[in-house]
Structures are given as C-alpha cells and as structure tokens.
Image: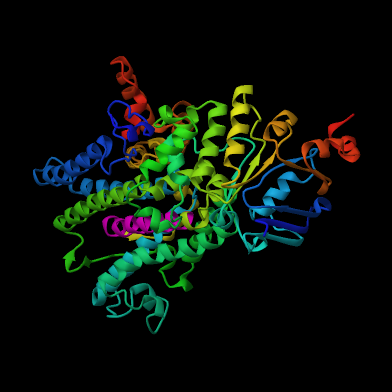
Amino acid sequence: MEKGNDAVPAPRSGHTATLNRKTLLNTRGTIFLCVLAAVAVGVPYLNATGMLPDYAVSLIGKYLCFALLAIALDLLWGYCGILSLGHGAFFALGGYAMGMHLMREIGERGVYANPDLPDFMVFLNWQELPWFWWGFDTFWFAALMALFVPGLLAFIFGYFAFRSRVTGVYLSIITQAMTYALMLAFFRNEMGFGGNNGLTDFKDVLGYDLQSQDTRIGLFVLSALAVAVGFLICRAVVISKAGKVIISIRDAESRTRFLGYRVEGYKLFVFVLSAMLAGLAGALYTPQVGIINPGEFSPANSIEIVIWVAIGGRGTLVGAAIGAVIVAASKTILTGLYPEAWLFVLGAMFVFVTIFMPRGVLGVWDGMIDGMWRMRGMDPNERRLRA
Amino acid sequence: MSLLILDGVSRSFDGFKAVNGMTLAIEPGELRAIIGPNGAGKTTMMDIVTGKTRPDGGTVRFDGHDMTRIDEAGSARLGIGRKFQKPTVFETHTVEDNILLSLRDDRGVFATLFSGADDTARVAELLALIRLEDRRLDLAADLSHGQKQWLEIGMLLAQDPKLLLIDEPAAGMTDEETARTAALLRDLAGDHAVVVVEHDMEFVRALDCRVTCLHQGRVLAEGSLAQVSANEQVVEVYLGR
C-alpha cells in the first residue's frame, strides 16, 4: 500500500471509499414502481375481460390520485417536518383548474346552451365570463394553472410563514385556517366557481368523451404514470444533498442555520413542490370523479391526508402511497356497509397506528426485514444505508 | 485590525439587561476563554455575534461586516462557526453526511439539489482528526455523548471558519476527552480565532490563553488566568473565596 493512502480510512467491507450516496431506485422503490406498472396494465386488462366492473377503474384511479397527494404531503411532513393541515386546498385548486377547463369544454351542450358561459353563470344572470376564467378553454393553459395556482399560493403563504419563522403547531393551525377560508370563499356563488354545487356535468376532455370507458382507462393510466413521476421527483429530491439539508432542518433546524443554510429557502422549495404535486393529483381527480366542489377544501379532508401518511409510514414516500390506498379503500367499503361507522373507524385506525405502529405499515414491514437480516447474522444498518 | 469587535453592545429582555454595554475585541487567530457566573451574558453575547439576536444598541463588527443586520446563516457564511453546549448533530444522518453537509460549499437550494462530486478526501481527513473514521457510516444518533461533541467540532472545522464560538465544550466529557479537547482547541488557534465559554477552571487552565470574565452583561476583567483570578471583583462574583 502506498504511504499516501494511510490517511484514508479503510473502507468497511462492501463499501468503497467514496461517500455513501443513495440510489434513485432502491429495492423498495423498484418494487413500488413494478406494482404500479402491474396495476396500470392489470386493471384495464381485467376490465376488458369483464372481471372488473367499469366503475372500479375510475375508483382505483381516484385512489391513485390520493396516493400522489399522500406522497406530496410526505415529502413535506416526513422529510422536512412541516405538518400541513391544509394540503387538501392545493389538491382542490388543481381540481378546480381542471374543472374550469372541463366546464368550458361543455360549450353549447349545457342546459342553457350558452357557448361562452357555464350554466351556473347563466343561472346567476352573469353577462360575460369573469377575467379569471379567461384562457381556461385551452387545455394546456388549464393544465399549467393546475400546477401554477397551488404553487403560487404555497409560495406566497410559505414566504411569509417561513420568513416569520412560524413553525410546529402554529404553522399547522394556519394551514388549516387557509383551507377553511378557501372553503368558505368557494361556497359563495359570487366567487364565480359554481358555489356549493361546484363544477360538474363535464362532457369531454381533448375531444374524448368522459363517459366512455376508453377515456376512463386513459385517465387511469395517466394517474398511475403521475404517481410514478411524482414518486421519482420526490425520491430524487430526498436523496440529493438538498434532501439531506431538508432532513437536517427537520431534526435540528437551528444547527442547519448555523451551518449557513437559509432554512426559509429550503422550506419554501419543498412546500411549493409539494403543493404543485398535490395540484397535479387534483387535476387528475376531477375528470375521474366527474365533480369538484368546495367540500374538497374542508379541513377534515386535509386531516385525512395526514392520517394516510401516518398509517402508511412517514418519511418513506412509498408508505404514504400505501396508506392512502388502504384508508381510501377501507372508506369505500365501510361507507357502503355502515355509513355512520366510518369516522369512528378512521379515528380508531389513527389511534391504533400511532400507539402500536409509530412508523406505520411500512415500519412494521421494515422491522420484519431487519429481523430476517439479523437471523442471517447481518447488520440491518448496512441495509438501511442503501435504502 | 481585530477580527471581532463588540463596542458598547446592549440587549435587554423584558427589562432584564442580558448584555449591558459590553466591549470586547478578538484578534485573528486568538484563543480566548470567557468565564462568568450564570446570567453574565455569555450566551446572549454569542447570539448577538451570530445574528440570532439583534442588539438594542452598540456596534458589532466581524471581519469588516456589520453583524447587527445579518442572520444566523449569514454569520456562518461570513466565517463564524458555533458549537452549542448540548451537542447538536444531525442524528438521522450518518457521521460522514454530518461532515459533508458542513463542508464549505454553495448553500443555495438549487446548488445542493444538483450537487455533484463530494470532497471525499476532506471528509476522510476531518474524520481522522476527530477520530471517528471507523464510525463513518453509523448514524450520529448512535455515537456516545463525547463522540457527538467531537463530531460537532468536526462539523465546525469543515466550515473552515475564521472564528469558532464554542460553548462549554468540556461539559459531559471524560477527563481524557477534556484534555484532548483542550489540546485540539490550542492547535486550532492560529489558523482560526477560537472563543471558548467555559465553567470548568481546570479546562480554562489547560487552554493557557487570555481570559475574559463577564458579569451582569459587561466585561469585569481581562488578562491572563493568573491576573483574572487575582482580581478582587472576579473572586467576589465568580470564583468565590
């Protein structure tokens, strides 16, 4: 061995002297994307062969939108420690942006057959389209707005909140207030977003009939793709050096500041990115469920997103998606069987997970894998480094 | 010219004058120990220097910059490294990541988002210095108290600061670790100015440097340890008879 190498510590077995960098696709991420691909192919196939009813495709598509929303919140809460209790607002804004386009697409096919004004505006005796509806007749403009509007709101809100160093419970409360205020605003007819009925009766998107099963399958596959892209974006962020800074902010904010990192900037970046992903989820949600209304802004919805992430496993991305699907599917089943019981079950699930599975479903899974490694005489720490 | 100058600095909290007309100068490369009873204004002084707290009056200049208009991150970027009394490291990161995040580099969001190669050699060098090479890939949470103190010192060195502010480094360390820490700080002085706040008089003796005694938010005495210990007022308020 050359003398110059003496200063370099001997690498441990299995590691090179380069710094340990996590890869974009670890085992768990690969499994997740494979399952997602299998769902994206399998569900339409089962539907085509008649083994899965038509409505189930849109239902699972809706779960995928929730999964993306949960991943977005996990990036913010699980990695940066910012508990947003108003993430439903960004989702709903994305949904409204897409809904506005779908309303304009109805055109003369509405009840009042007005080529420019959606039905609810004719009903309210409005003479012309309000300025904030301009441009939404173009799909790409609406799609851009579905990302831009949630991003802008997150930017303005986050800029002031983070600059004033509002953290913890206080921040959670004002995010909750934000979504509540938006809900009240969107309930008003004068706002020009359809009041408490919201936006509905959509006909088609980009010329494809929304009632046809082919369009629904197309939207379903797009949703699966969006989950994959959203996951990869979040994963790329969390394994980057910026991701390490974000985790540092979560664990020791003042230490991070004293190392020279402007914490506000990092928080703002994560908040805006997360809001935009939530907006994307909302934009895919609206055409699949066929309606968007102010109820989506309700504080209870935003709290439910937090419960998805907690149940799946915070700070794992994959866990958030799993949690969203588990809870949303349970909700579908239970509200069908015992409508009154759902909120009690949701509460019980949350309490149970908090007490007995603090790291969520994925934490339990991780514990089992760690156990297997130990049984084979290996150090589970080694595995975690690569995860 | 002095590296750090505090001139007539005051700051009160709800009427309590934590720092009251404090005047202090630190030369480049100097090692300085700061002693004083609880509430003497040691921590507030460091908060003011690092931009965490704004003074009510007086001037603070570091390396030619007005520190009264700068935040914590700004002070770090100008070359001030601060070590807390309670060891503060990133527990869920590996030891090497703790060092990596502290290395002098662009601190912007997009710079770190797309950062490329890491300075592996520098990380290895620092890990060797703080004797944590073999804990490189362990989580910082798994280190002992003393090792965390060392890791934090390593993180400060990675910043390559002009001034190190160190709050009670010997707290919770074994005698051997304390001796090693004193030796390290003496080594560092020269390349960096080092200001150590400490209660342990044995440790201050081992630092063998100029000592400033604070009391009620101002400088009570300054000089060698022997001079300061002989000062009547210092004996009165701090050392005891």
Split into 4 quadrants, where in the image is the N terminus of chain A?
top left
Residue A357: x %, y % from top left: 43, 28
Frontmost residue, B117 versus A162? B117
Frontmost residue, A45 versus A16? A16
User: What residue is shown at x 11% (from left), y 43% (from top)?
Assistant: A50
Q: Name the outermost residue toward the left.
A: A49
Residue A269 shown in magenta: yes
Q: Is residue B11 left or right of residue B50?
A: right
Residue A223: x %, y % from top left: 25, 52
Q: Is residue B56 left or right of residue B179?
A: right
Q: Total of numbered circles in the picture?
A: 0
Q: Name the outermost residue toward the front.
A: A3
Residue B111: x %, y % from top left: 39, 57
User: What residue is shown at x 41% (from left), y 63% (from top)?
Assistant: A151
User: What residue is shown at x 59% (from left), y 26% (from top)?
Assistant: B177
Where B152 falls versus B62 (above or below)? above
Magenta part of the chain: A267-289
